[in-house]
């Protein structure tokens, strides 16, 4: 039955002749078949949407079932208690018997001390606030004539002209570092932070906390610019983006803006976020204006303009391609098992490769690092190249047999259209099979978005980009963001409004980590 034809009224008289009735039944059967197909397609999409929203996040495939007799026995003490860190302060509580209790009840003579039992627990005290009072002493010459000698020559005052890290601000460096870390590392919105401070007897308005964050980002902006410039010197940059809600002035509705993450390589290990209101290619084009090298990213249309002159080469994400075949397998298509097995072989090759070596100023170590990259390149060509050839052949054979809009057809189309970029990681040993590094980095924004919800303005978006960059770089380097910011914020304030590139160099998180005395192991970075 043609969907565009006028519908027959339910009470319309039926034809009397058999051929007309048969034709009507055939039309109804065709219509029922069409509706069933649409229903099956909608059910598949609904199941996929429900799984995306409520299902497991891991992309690991279920392991094959192993008979109970072949399953190795599990150790009972597999998850033993970890020892408490040695650098923590130890406070002792000693329990002793009274003099009367030390007397033996049997013979009446004193008992002898034979030892003790010790137990250690991890304890804490709530955040302790204190007032940091800065006293700057002034001295004046009592011999010079005030009428002839200017005051600036007669009088000298110790200390900086302004007490930072915010001029004339209420917060000290530790409190400002705590606010930045709590918002951008621990995902606490400012109203919740205000409540936490209030429980300690300190009243600070949410608007004040927001202003502190803006002022902190202004202080860190020169450092952010240096991090941006140094990321562009990388051989490969990992890139990805995520949407954020942006409040529209004068409207009760929000619009969708974007935060873009760019991550440098091991030589320039910085995480730099960029904020754009529009979701176009202008943002990546502006950010990567002076970049030449590889861009490890998803097949996003906004990146397409970057690849025209071959100055930037696209390395597509293998995990994205694999994920689409996972969706086809979850939709019940058995044909997806073959590409998933091939992707499993590709990842097995990656796990068997010798690890990359860190940067070094030692010529011998640099040569060893170069040799390791060449070794990885050779092994990939030898072991992963044939797997890609097999996958390419399978894609060509299956393309005509899969409906373009079905889960399998979508996966085949994505892999076929981006096959050259998917295989490009084979060109160099320092490239990666997937772009999971960027996805893990953007998880911080996704978690924070569930808490703070909306960016209040474009200024707030730029503030978030700067502070997410600093905190994200600290996490990338396994540096405690609070420890770094507590020193970097007043240090940058002391440099004045126009610090030089050389002055900023020592405040880059990786340089700060190298220059910092390591009296004890650094605190683990705040969990995302």
Image: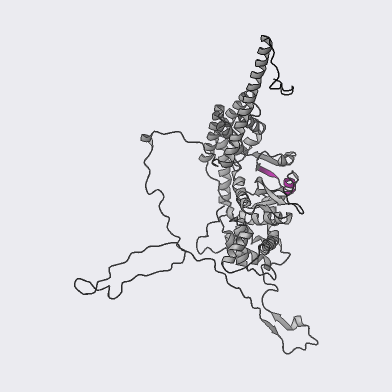
The residue at 72%/87% (across/down) is: 141
Image quadrant in which you'd find residue 525: bottom right
Q: Is residue 87 left or right of residue 37?
A: left
Q: Position of residue 130 (x, y in %)?
A: 58, 72
- Relative depth, front residue between 167 and 457: 457
Q: How is the image coloured?
A: one colour
Instruction: Give above or below for 522 relative to 438.
Output: below
Q: Position of residue 193 (x, y in %)?
A: 61, 61
Q: Is residue 114 left or right of residue 315?
A: left
The residue at 56%/59% (across/down) is: 480
Q: Position of residue 229 (x, y in %)?
A: 70, 53
Outermost residue toward the left? 107
Q: Position of residue 423 (x, y in %)?
A: 62, 35
Instruction: Give above or below for 420 relative to 121.
Output: above
Outermost residue toward the right? 148
**Is residue 230 among the parts visible in the rendering?**
no
Instruction: Indicate yes or no whether the magenta region holds residue 464.
Output: no
* Figure label count: 0
The residue at 61%/73% (across/down) is: 132
- In the rendered image, the quadrant that contains the N terminus is top right
Image quadrant in which you'd find residue 38: top right
Q: Which residues are magenta?
A: 283-295
Instruction: Give above or below for 99 relative to 16.
Output: below
**Is residue 401 among the parts visible in the rendering?**
yes
Instruction: Give above or below for 220 relative to 437.
Output: below
- Relative depth, front residue between 455 and 371: 455
């Amino acid at each position: 039955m043609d969907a565009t034809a006028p519908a027959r009224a339910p009470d319309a008289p039926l034809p009397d002749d058999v051929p007309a009735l048969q034709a009507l039944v055939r039309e109804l059967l065709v219509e029922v078949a069409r509706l069933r197909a649409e229903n099956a397609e909608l059910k598949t999409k609904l199941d996929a949407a429900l799984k995306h929203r409520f299902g497991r996040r891991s992309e690991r495939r279920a392991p094959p079932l192993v008979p109970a007799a072949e399953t190795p026995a599990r150790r009972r003490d597999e998850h033993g208690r970890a020892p408490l860190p040695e650098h923590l302060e130890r406070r002792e509580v000693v329990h002793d018997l009274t003099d009367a209790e030390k007397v033996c009840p049997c013979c009446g003579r004193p008992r002898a001390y034979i030892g003790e039992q010790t137990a250690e627990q991890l304890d804490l005290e709530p955040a302790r606030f204190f007032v940091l009072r800065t006293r700057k002493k002034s001295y004046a010459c009592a011999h010079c004539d005030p009428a002839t000698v200017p005051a600036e020559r007669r009088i000298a005052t110790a200390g900086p002209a302004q007490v930072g890290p915010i001029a004339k601000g209420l917060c000290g460096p530790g409190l400002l570092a705590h606010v930045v870390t709590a918002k951008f590392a621990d995902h606490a919105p400012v109203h919740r932070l205000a409540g936490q401070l209030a429980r300690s007897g300190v009243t600070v308005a949410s608007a004040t906390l927001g202003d502190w964050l803006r002022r902190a980002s202004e202080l860190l902006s020169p450092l952010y610019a240096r991090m941006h410039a140094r990321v562009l010197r990388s051989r490969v940059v990992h890139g990805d983006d995520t949407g954020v809600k942006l409040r529209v002035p004068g409207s009760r509705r929000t619009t969708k803006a974007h935060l873009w993450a760019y991550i440098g390589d091991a030589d320039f290990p910085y995480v730099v976020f960029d904020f754009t209101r529009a979701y176009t290619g202008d943002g990546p084009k502006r950010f990567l204006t002076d970049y030449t090298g590889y861009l490890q990213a998803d097949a996003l249309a906004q990146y397409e303009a970057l690849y025209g002159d071959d100055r930037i080469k696209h390395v597509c994400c293998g995990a994205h391609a694999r994920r689409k075949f996972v969706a086809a397998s979850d939709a019940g298509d058995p044909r997806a098992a073959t590409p998933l097995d091939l992707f499993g072989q590709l990842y097995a090759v990656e796990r068997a490769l010798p690890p990359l070596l860190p940067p070094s100023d030692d010529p011998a170590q640099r040569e060893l690092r170069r040799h390791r990259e060449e070794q990885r390149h050779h092994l990939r060509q030898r072991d992963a190249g044939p797997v890609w050839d097999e996958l390419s052949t399978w894609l060509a054979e299956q393309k005509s047999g899969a409906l373009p809009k079905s889960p399998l057809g979508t996966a085949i189309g994505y892999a076929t259209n981006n096959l050259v970029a998917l295989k490009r990681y084979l060109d160099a040993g320092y490239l990666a099979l997937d772009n999971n590094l960027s996805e893990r980095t953007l998880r911080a924004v996704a978690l924070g978005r569930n808490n703070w919800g909306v960016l209040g303005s474009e200024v707030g978006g730029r503030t978030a980009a700067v502070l997410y960059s600093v905190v994200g770089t600290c996490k990338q380097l396994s540096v405690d963001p609070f420890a770094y910011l507590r020193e970097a914020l007043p240090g940058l304030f002391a440099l004045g409004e126009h610090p030089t590139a050389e002055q900023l160099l020592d405040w880059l998180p990786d340089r700060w980590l190298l220059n910092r005395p390591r009296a004890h192991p650094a605190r683990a970075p705040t969990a995302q």
